[in-house]
Every structure is written in structure tokens, then in C-alpha cells.
Image: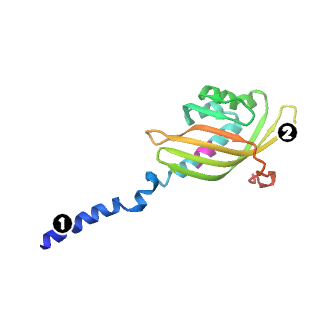
Amino acid sequence: MRMKSSLIAAILAITLPMSSPANALDGHTETSPTDEQMIIEWGTKWQQLFQSGNVEQMRDMYEPDAVLMAHGALPQTGVDAILSFLGRNKAAGNRVTIDFANEDITIDGQRAYLTAKYWMTITLANSQVLDFKGRSFLVYKKSGEGQWRLWRDMDNQAPDVAAEDRPAR
């Protein structure tokens, strides 16, 4: 009888953690605590490369079928089209600064969703300054190697994003 009780206790100890509500919420799979940090680091790297005009170095940061839907522009589909679009400011001799304030990051298995406020200043070659502010919605895919790549990027100019809220440089 004692052996039977030990066997039942062992089975319960093994199966209870697997069937707990915390492990079965909404079909979400558990994620590494580093996934969110990897997305944040991705954004920092993207910001640095974009501002410096080194957009070709962003190639591996995008899924091959990525789509950029920037406010007021036609969708750019595929990495080559996206990099060409992002590189046009440097090609024109403009200087760009961009800042982000992440509002929400949700990791759901092999997908990640990020909503962020953005502020972008473009100083044209003739010294004219253009300021844009709004919100971005980004969808990332996680590769088999564990690398996050941007799959969808949609930006708008949101009226609730205030110039005075831009993060300090």
C-alpha cells in the first residue's frame, strides 16, 4: 500500500505543474525572459543604423516578405524595397534623427507585437527641418535560430503624440 501511495504522489507531482492554469493561458506558449529584451535591442540597433544611413546593414533584421506601411507612402514589400525606401534620406543628403517610446510589447510564441510612439526629425540638405510624430505597430517573427526579424511595420501620425513628450537625447 505504501508503494502504491508513493507512486500516486509521484504521478501527481509530475502532472500537476503541466496542467496548471498558468501554463495553459489562452494557448500562449512560454517565452524566454530574454525575448522582450531582444526586441528592445533590435529597436536600438535599427535606430542607430537608420540614423547613420547604414540601411544595408539592416538586411538581416527583416523577413524576406516584410512589408513597410509608412504614413502617406505606398507600401514597400520585400527587403530590397524597404531598404531603398529607408535609404532615400541619406541618398538625398538629409540628416535624420528618430526616437521611440515603447508602449506595449506582447510576445506570443513565434510572433511579437510592439506598439511605440515615434518622433522623427529630418533636416534637409537645404537646412529645412521637418518634424513627424506618431505611432508604430510592428510585428516580428522569430526564426528557428531564435532571432527576431521584422515582418510588418505600420506607422501613422497620431494626434495624441506630443512633441514635448519626445525622449531626451
Q: Amino acid at mark 2?
A: Val
Amino acid type indicated by mark 1 = Leu
The answer to whether 158 is drawn above or below residue 66 in the figure is below
Instruction: Look at the image and say whether residue 142 sits in the magenta stretch.
Output: no
The mark found on residue 45 in the picture is none
Taking depth in this image into account, of 155 and 37 the one nearest to the observer is: 155
Q: Within the image, what quadrant is residue 128 found in?
A: top right
Residue 57 in sight here: no
Residue at label 1?
A: 7
**Is 168 placed above or below 84 here?**
below
Instruction: Give the SS element for disc 2.
Output: strand
Question: Where 23 falls versus 128 (above or below)?
Answer: below
State the image coordinates of residue 88 (x, y, percent, origin top left): 73, 28
Instruction: Give the x, y percent position of residue 133.
Output: 77, 45
Q: Residue at x 26, y 65 (%)?
A: 12
Answer with left or right where residue 129 lies relative to residue 141.
right
For the magenta stretch, what is the residue range?
Answer: 40-45
At which x and y percent is residue 75? Answer: 67, 30
Which of the two marks, 1 or 2, is nearer to us in this view? 1
Q: Which residue is mark 2?
A: 129
Q: Residue at x 79, y 30 (%)?
A: 93
